[in-house]
Image (spheres, coloured by chain):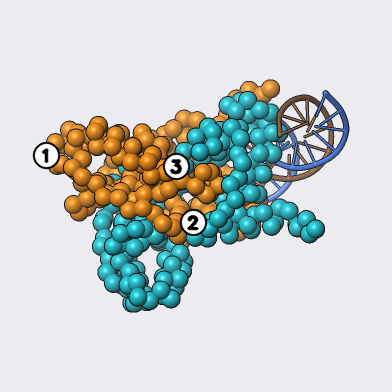
Chain colours: A cyan, B orange, C blue, D brown
Amino acid sequence: MVKAPPRATAAILAGAMRFFRAPHYDKPDMDLDRFDRLLLNLVQQDSMQTAEQLAEHVGLSPSAIQRRLKRMREQGVIVRDVAVVDPRAVGRPTFFVVSLEIERERPELLAQLREWLTKRAEIQQVFYVTGQNDFVLIVTAPDTEAFDAMMSQLMQENPNVHRFTTNVVLGLVKQGLTIPIPPANA
Amino acid sequence: MVKAPPRATAAILAGAMRFFRAPHYDKPDMDLDRFDRLLLNLVQQDSMQTAEQLAEHVGLSPSAIQRRLKRMREQGVIVRDVAVVDPRAVGRPTFFVVSLEIERERPELLAQLREWLTKRAEIQQVFYVTGQNDFVLIVTAPDTEAFDAMMSQLMQENPNVHRFTTNVVLGLVKQGLTIPIPPANA
DNA sequence: TCTGAAAAATTTCAACT
DNA sequence: AGTTGAAATTTTTCAGA
């Protein structure tokens, strides 16, 4: 039998790795009981609540809450905790929804493109999708010129991108990363 | 037991309200100095760092850090703090990018549709965009059937939605709400 | 508005049910 | 696993520059 690895660090790294792997990668299903699920729904709304506040909602002691949250962070169920900034408070950046159409004949360039997209901070989100448009991006830029400049660079440095279509976001109706978690396992 | 902590409940609510207002609403520009901006970039990556850790990066005392973060949360610059959950750890939900085409002749139904979209927890994000497709949605569902059911309901209850196109997300390459904040004011 | 120290609250940890 | 209670850490408050 193998010795137990340095527990916390290994678990955190594994969590981070899993998050960036292709989604078809087989992640063993975590078994989350109804308390974990309740907790996840709560901290997805507000991660700054104290363990005591959460304990009241969930019906456990603060210690139990802390232990569960710590475990889920180590397992990678909770990937990270972030502050959400109001775009209008920081220079009112413009948002764009961009669809990229990719040349499929050169699969070796795909990894390079994914890396390119991942590195750019202005690109908030990247979805690899079915259909003729292979990637959908959510991009934020201080203005249209900055966006145009970025897209020119994208086209220059990634020859497998055939074309793209841009939709300017006129209104952010709703934004979040919340995943609704049903009480029982699906 | 301790009495309810003096958390800035009112401020959090105000922040949330601002976040969901129409984007053309005139929010006065906050003046953020270089320390605020640095701080925002840091807490967008990880909001669980202690004030002391942040203080080292920024070059201020922990007290100054706390005061600035508190102020920005009250002002609504920081809208909220959330835990990000790995989709694969919670029932492997499927993601969809949906484009809605709206009938423009009946503007009174638009507000109703916005409300409908905002209320549904499965709809993570809603962008109101230029072009023939008026809304772009990011939707998460436990499976395709659940997604189909939701879209049927959407079409039934919102007669001003003419048609929609769906792209199934094959891979979440990158997901986040981070807005890159340049050192100086734009 | 910052720093630095005191006060208060929260989180962590050990022992036990 | 959960709970309790004490120790350690962090956050909040406040005086002084």
User: Which amino acid type is shown beneath numbered disc 2?
Assistant: Pro
The numbered mark at residue B142 is: 3
Q: In terms of secondary structure, where does tag 3 sit?
A: loop
Amino acid type at mark 3: Pro
Q: How far from the left and from the top, in percent, is residue A97?
A: 31, 56
Work out whether disc 3 and disc 2 sit on a shared chain: no
Residue B15 position in % (x across, y down): 42, 38
Q: Residue at x 78, y 59 (%)?
A: A2
Q: Quadrant of the N terminus of chain A?
A: bottom right
Q: Look at the numbered disc 1 and give the secondary structure of its residue.
A: loop
Q: Which mark is residue A144?
A: none
Identify residue type, mark 1.
Answer: Glu
Q: Position of residue A135 (x, y in %)?
A: 35, 61
* Circle 1 residue: B105
Examine the rendered structure and indicate whether residue A84 appears above or below residue B5: below
| Pointer 2 residue | A23
Instruction: State yes or no: discs 1 and 2 in contact (Cβ < 8 Å).
Output: no
